[in-house]
Image (cartoon, helix red, strand yellow):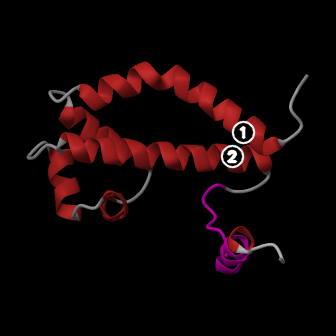
Amino acid sequence: MANLDPEVEAREGFLTFLKSQRGALHHIADTSDDNFVLAVSIVSRAGLPQAEVAKKIGVSQSTISRWSKGVNLPSNSIIRKALFSELIKAFDEYVLKMTNPDARVDEPEPPLAHGARHMRRNARAPV
């Protein structure tokens, strides 16, 4: 019997996806000699300008540029941070698509909606 809660279905589906990718992610995170290929992959898969990728993972735009050219290579800690960031983004997109198939993934949430959700989450029940 299918679960009717779209959020639960989204989580279960995403966990299945992650399990299917576990071998690839483990290999990428533990391989230091393929850092050049990985650096280029991180930048290109993000689908963002180099400056935006740099901001998201906490490095300068010139660092991203040097990685893309093979001048420097990212450290393993930066690689793990980028992979984690990519997984979080993928999860958010997956949940959004499962709970609202018509929503555009690249649309940011309106600030008021975020604030209202935050207030509901932190509100205490009357005593």
Q: Hey, what amino acid is under mark 2?
A: Val
Mark seen at residue 10: 1
Q: Farthest residue in the left direction?
A: 71
- Residue 56's x, y, as percent? 37, 60
- Report how far apart the C-alphas of labels 1 and 2 lie in the structure: 5 Å
Mark 1, Cα crowd under 10 Å, few <14 / some 14-19 / many 20+, is some
Q: Do the numbered discs 1 and 2 sit on residues whose CB atoms are within 8 Å? A: yes
The residue indicated by pointer 2 is: 95
Residue beneath the point at 62% across and 48% down? 93
Q: Is residue 58 above or below residue 91?
A: below
Residue 101 can be seen, yes or no:
no
- Residue 95's x, y, as percent? 68, 46
Q: Is residue 64 above or below residue 55?
A: above
**Relative to residue 15, is residue 62 drawn left or right?**
left
Q: Is residue 86 above or below residue 59?
A: above
Mark 2, Cα crowd under 10 Å, few <14 / some 14-19 / many 20+, is some
Quarter residue 40 falls in: top left
- Residue range in magenta is 105-119
Question: Helix, strand or loop at disc 1?
Answer: helix
Residue beneath the point at 84% across and 77% down? 126
Question: Helix, strand or loop at disc 2?
Answer: helix
Q: Earlier in the sequence, mark 1 or mark 2?
A: 1
